[in-house]
Image: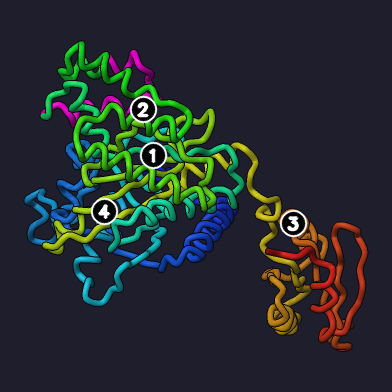
Amino acid sequence: MPGTAPPSGMRDFLPEDVRRREHAIGIIKRVYERYGFEPLETPAAENLETLLGRYGDEGNKLIFKILRRGEHEATGQADLALRYDLTVPLARVVAQYQAQLPRPFRRYQIQPVWRADRPGRGRFREFYQCDIDALGSTSPVVEAELCGAVADALGELGFADFAIRINHRELLTSLLRAAGVAEDAHGAAMVALDKLDKIGGDGVARELAERGVGTEARETLLVFFAAAPDVDQELARLGALVTDERGAAAVENLRAIGALAASTSAAGRLRIDPSLARGLDYYTGAIMEINVADLPGSLGAGGRYDNLVGMFSGQPIPACGFSLGLERILVVMGERGMFPASLASAPADVLVATFDAAGAGPAMRLADRLRGAGLRVMVYPDPGKIGRQIKYADSRGIPYVAILGEDEIKAGSVTMKHLATQTQDTYDQAAAAAAILERLPARG
């Protein structure tokens, strides 16, 4: 007998789970649209060549490949893959439709992605990303608005204790160079430094040693990456450490982003973190990550990737984006009791009871009338004892049971039983909906 559990790292979503997801997605979508972002969707599968080489060696290993089909199946080769993120598909779309899209182009995309990763707490193989991206401008206004949008979204979801860590890839490269790390070891050093908040300075030092970074360079790096809490102080400190023009320009870029973000909901939440690296190879400028106090991992991340679209279009198109991780957000909201009580709502406002087969037609007509007035209505499909039907409604939290017996059908009326108070009133069917709607709590 086959098992009934879904594949490891993938989940079924029961009604309460779906309501919670739709609640969070609805808030995030409304915030994104307030910032002028437009919706976009792309296929679940991409050509394998579209994805390979965009995420680094580690990312390539996590791509879910799709075997060739039909007569090619026996080869064991793959030509398609499930999308790994929403950014590379966006770059492909912009290259494909650049003549039809405005510039700047701002889009949001809320869809699932797939990674063949090791499942864990808040980490899944199938999960939703909630992305916003702006293409066509190098202005720091873009980064500032992205930070403002995600800060608004998290604030409206109920988060208050989050910070937006920000760094710059050019600044990181300049600091590695100034510390004496060989160019061919930069990638390995970035991977280690990105773990500073997780494994601490000693852990990073060990990883740097394992990756071939010398003792003096390791010690210098750990001094370099001891961030100051104040943004202005940290930028001044980093500006004094960099030794080349690109590093200095990166510091000024971060300064401009911080000044502009001060006019958004991200004000007071930015933290300059020179150890932030972000693992994806396509980032070229500012990089961001959202962290919550006393919570490992992040709720979202992003950055500037000015060269990615050019890989598909043959011409450079500047771009920057931010992605909120829906699954992790939902896990934390559930653990903290952040969902409104109204989400645990009943599937209907009214259950129409049926006594016999002859009453099914009148019950259906009454239900249609009540639905037309804005009520959520369920018709109990199996006629029989009214007590059993009331018990079902009570178990599902349905507040009203419409009793439509022979007398009510003849009179064109309906008796509405309120289960919480165990009271009932009889109304003309034309007036019943308005009476019930007036008594129900507002939904919103």
Counting residues from the start of the chain, the first of labels 1 and 4 encountered is 4
Q: Main secondary structure of the magenta part?
A: helix
Residue 442 position by quadrant: bottom right
Percent x, y of residue 135? 30, 61
SS at circle 2: helix
Rendered view: 36 above or below 130:
below
Disc 3 to disc 2, how far (Cα)? 60 Å
Q: State the mark number for residue 237.
A: 2
Disc 1 to disc 4, how far (Cα)? 30 Å
Counting residues from the start of the chain, the first of labels 3 and 2 encountered is 2
Counting residues from the start of the chain, the first of labels 2 and 1 encountered is 1
Neighbourhood count class around disc 3 (C-alpha, 10 Å): few under 14, some 14–19, many 20 upward: some
Viewer-proximal residue among 320 and 179 = 179
The answer to whether mark 4 and mark 3 are in CB contact below 8 A is no
Residue 49 visible in image = yes
Neighbourhood count class around disc 2 (C-alpha, 10 Å): few under 14, some 14–19, many 20 upward: some
Q: State the mark number for residue 82.
A: 4
SS at circle 4: strand
Q: Which residue is mark 3?
A: 397
Q: Start and end of the magenta stretch? A: 184-205
Disc 2 to disc 1, how far (Cα)? 15 Å
